[in-house]
Amino acid sequence: MRYHQKYGLLKQQQGKFLWLNTNEKRYNMIIRDIVILLIAAVLMVVTGMEVKAKSYQDVEYGSWFYSSVADVSKKGIMTGYADGNFGPMNYLTRGELATIIYRIHEKPETIYRPEFPDVTDGKFYSVPVTWAHSYGVITGYEDGNFGPENNISREELATMLYRYAQKLGYDVSEAGDISVFPDAGKVSKFAKNAMIWANGAGIITGDSGMLNPQGTVNRAVGATMLSRFTNFIGMTNQNEGSQTTPSVSGGLSVQGTQLVDEKGDAVQLKGISTHGLAWFPQYVNEDLFREFRENWDVNVIRLAMYTAESGGYCTDGDKRKLKELVRRGVEYATNQDMYVIIDWHILSDHNPNQYKAESIRFFSEMSKEFSGHNNVLYEICNEPNGGTTWGEVKSYANEVIPVIRANDPDALILVGTPNWSQYVNEAAADPITGYDNIMYTLHFYAATHTDYLRETMAAAINAGAPIFVSEYGICDASGNGAINEAQANVWVDLMDQYEISYVAWNLSNKNESSSIIRSTVNKVSGFSEEDLSDSGRWLYHVLTGERGGPSAGGNGNGTDDNNTGTGEGTNGPNGGSVTESGEFEIRAVRINQWEAEGRTFYQYMLTVKNTSTQPCQDWEVNIKFNGDIALSSGWNGKYSVEGNILHISSMDYNGKLDAGGSTGDVGFIISGATGVEIQ
Ligand code: IDC
């Protein structure tokens, strides 16, 4: 049933986004003929259907409804329009509210029944209304209609939520004193108890001092009420990935090359690094950390403590003060339910062995102090450089790791790699053995480091090295200069594809382009978008504009609140390589290109994810390019070419995908004319 609806949805979009035929057999689906429309200018692409954009053009960071919209968006219960807007001033309808409650209830499988003459089949609200009626949450009008497209009133909204809370078994006895409102007498009889409860529970608090029971509810106000309501019933965010927090995911560990949570599920940490703690201590404050957690979807903070520069821990720095900053940083991050990295930030001291004794003392003390924390990560050397070899780093690591392990047997430890944490291939070839939960760091600056470093990273992972990007910038390697968003986006796509964690440099207002705060802004929390530098704005959008989001699932072909948004494709710098069909998600990322034999060669990586609720046995993909191509090589798939179409089907070992499962490491190299790209 659901697949046929999907099929209809996709067919409607044919030509515009992608075309998909689903051959459905029970538990055996084959995807074929997927043509991906790729947008981004140079390297790739994307289009998204059913993308839940969390950054809407018309919901400004800093507006009064921002955090409510972000909250309901993260919870997957209200989404935006196809044009990238949320429509905060549009009125919420009765059909929309029924749909929202249906989503809160995790969309129980329901077959449409024609119970109200004005609720016909095929609307986005048809199934939700059927369900909400049978569940006892809604009733129709006296004339037998439901009025799905009528604007909902404040008292109707209260009534539906009240009934729903009761059905869920919540205590709805909390009573507000609505008699304090001058218009309390206007509340309809049917809604009286509901309004008293909604006021008492803090869900409806008043509209300029009035209850305004028959007044409309715009989507901004609706988001606010629904955010409060879902908090009341204890609903948590459904979005994985960026929403990973210590309280949800617990202690981290490494399985193969992947960072996983306590349950063994893959997790990604995404966040921000402080600048040197000695130079910018003011940003270690809890209000700001809270802001990062709540408004930026940050789940990790890196505390960068330089070891050698002026004010460095091992040179002329105030050790006591620096350690105090680290302690406060850990405390605030912990209070705000985030992971935190203690970074021994070697740089001008080139070789971590230079201050090895200090390092051992420091990490011994810190790991003892934080041994009870499962959210503290230790980064034992930021960036070995100046000819420091991997052998030297490894020997240092082999002395520092056991010191940490003695206090904290399973904390995640990050180890830098030679050449400013770029030679992860050397770590891959000669890994540290004898300890679990070790990851190697790779650092990049997108305007300097491009294809070749991405390739190094991909190769290291394929060779079995767990990689953590504990620092990156989108400007050049000096931390300054022009930013390169296109390259930065390619990096983000690649890291998302491999579920690699990434932490941006830097949290300061220093006058350099890697700083996320403008140099003219002196406040230390409460930032709005205007306070952010170009790097800051980009970061904010990447972190909050998570692509993919919770599986769209669903019932439909609605527009409006039923998430058929094109999301980030049109919505800013966050263009990525995600293509969602609703049940499957295909990502194609171009990671490299080069000239040879008068042709251009292009290397791509592909991930196929089954976002449906049922396993599939195999898959087939057709990718259409804007010019004829020749296949040079392909792996982990069966490949053939016809003109400008590359046909890929699964192998015996990677066709079967569990519900929610995916297969990566599918890749190919093609050649063609200059400028060939996925169409
Ligand atoms: C830079 C800071 C800059 C500071 C300099 C030297 O942005 O203000 O003057 O360090 O202390 C790194 C390092 C990181 C660098 C950054 C940019 O880990 O400390 O910060 N970078 O140069 N590796 C690559 C780039």
Image (cartoon, rainbow, N blue to C red):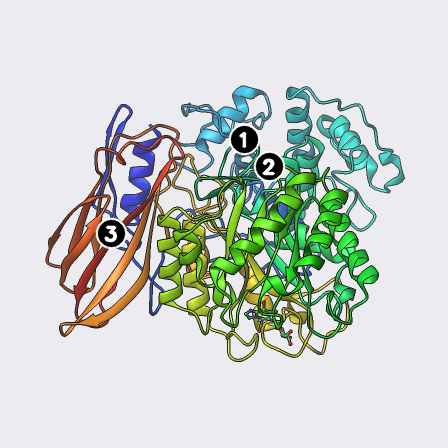
Q: Residues within 10 Å of mark 1 (few under 14, many from 20)?
A: few
CB contact under 8 Å: marks 2 and 3? no
Residue at mark 3 to residue at mark 1: CA–CA distance: 36 Å
The answer to whether any part of residue 584 appears in the image is yes
Total of numbered circles in the picture? 3
Return the residue found at the far right: 180
First of labels 2, 3 by sequence position: 3
Tell me the amino acid under the disc marked 3.
Val
For mark 3, give the secondary structure. Answer: loop
CB contact under 8 Å: marks 1 and 2? yes
Q: Residue at x 58, y 69 (%)?
A: 350
Q: Residues within 10 Å of mark 3 (few under 14, many from 20)?
A: many
Tell me the amino acid under the disc marked 2.
Ser
**Residue 82 coordinates in the image, percent (x, y):** 44, 53
Q: Does 35 sit left or right of 243 as displayed? A: left
For mark 1, give the secondary structure. Answer: loop
Give the residue pinned by disc 2.
249
Q: Does 210 sit left or right of 14 as displayed? A: right
The answer to whether any part of residue 444 appears in the image is no
Give the residue pinned by disc 1.
263
State the mark number for residue 35: 3
For the residue pair 28 and 188, the one nearer the viewer reads as: 28
**Where the C terminus falls, by quadrant?**
bottom left
Residue at mark 2 to residue at mark 3: CA–CA distance: 36 Å
**Residue 408 coordinates in the image, percent (x, y):** 67, 39
Tell me the amino acid under the disc marked 1.
Lys
**Where the N terminus falls, by quadrant?**
top left
Q: Residue at x 25, y 34 (%)?
A: 653
Q: Residues within 10 Å of mark 2 (few under 14, many from 20)?
A: some
For the residue pair 218 and 279, the one nearer the viewer reads as: 279
Frontmost of labels 3 and 1 is 1
State the mark number for residue 175: none
